[in-house]
Image (cartoon, rainbow, N blue to C red):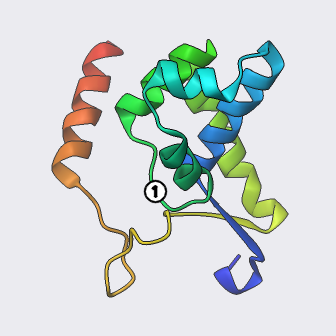
């Protein structure tokens, strides 16, 4: 499906944020407690949930811990949702403002490679 048929968009960080919020609501954890205990400010959380910034690895770890979520389970759920959204005419894209001038998504290749290496070592 091409992008012209899409009428909505979200980001992977927004999906993760929504899953974390759902867990907090289900377990009665107030968002103020989530912000305080995770170290993620309300302003940062708002930018993540509006699709204006990415959710960093350290913040994701802290948020999932406060919400009582398993990080691998959270990632699997978010990946399943992101794979299903295109069938609902929702595009999963990069946060606003994170694309280069020529439209290609900026990538931090070295950091991604290092992270992939560490994860592969931990899974062995």
Q: Residue at x 19, y 36 (%)?
A: 114
Q: Residue furthest left?
A: 110
Task: Quadrant for residue 90, please give it.
Answer: bottom right
State whether residue 54 appears in this view. Answer: yes
State whether residue 70 appears in this view. Answer: no
Residue behind mark 1:
53
The secondary element bearing badge 1 is classed as: loop
User: Which quarter of the image is occupied by the C terminus?
Assistant: top left
Q: Position of residue 44 (x, y in %)?
A: 48, 47
Closer to the camera in the image, 92 or 44? 44
Closer to the camera in the image, 18 or 117? 18
Q: Position of residue 119 (x, y in %)?
A: 31, 25
Q: Residue at x 37, y 34 (%)?
A: 57
Closer to the camera in the image, 30 or 110? 30
Answer with left or right where residue 39 lies relative to residue 49.
left
Number of numbered discs overlaid on the protein picture: 1
Answer with left or right where residue 56 lies relative to residue 91.
left
Q: Position of residue 92 (x, y in %)?
A: 62, 61
User: Which quarter of the image is occupied by the N terminus?
Assistant: bottom right
Q: Position of residue 2 (x, y in %)?
A: 67, 81
């Amino acid at each position: 499906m091409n992008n012209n048929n899409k009428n909505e968009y979200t980001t992977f960080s927004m999906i993760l944020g929504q899953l974390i919020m759902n867990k907090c609501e289900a377990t009665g954890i107030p968002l103020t407690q989530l912000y305080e205990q995770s170290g993620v400010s309300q302003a940062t959380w708002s930018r993540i949930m509006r699709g204006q910034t990415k959710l960093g690895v350290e913040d994701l770890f802290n948020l999932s811990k406060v919400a009582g979520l398993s990080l691998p389970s959270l990632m699997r759920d978010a990946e399943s949702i992101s794979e299903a959204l295109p069938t609902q005419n929702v595009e999963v894209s990069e946060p606003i403002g994170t694309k280069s001038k020529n439209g290609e998504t900026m990538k931090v290749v070295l950091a991604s490679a290092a992270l992939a290496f560490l994860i592969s070592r931990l899974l062995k």
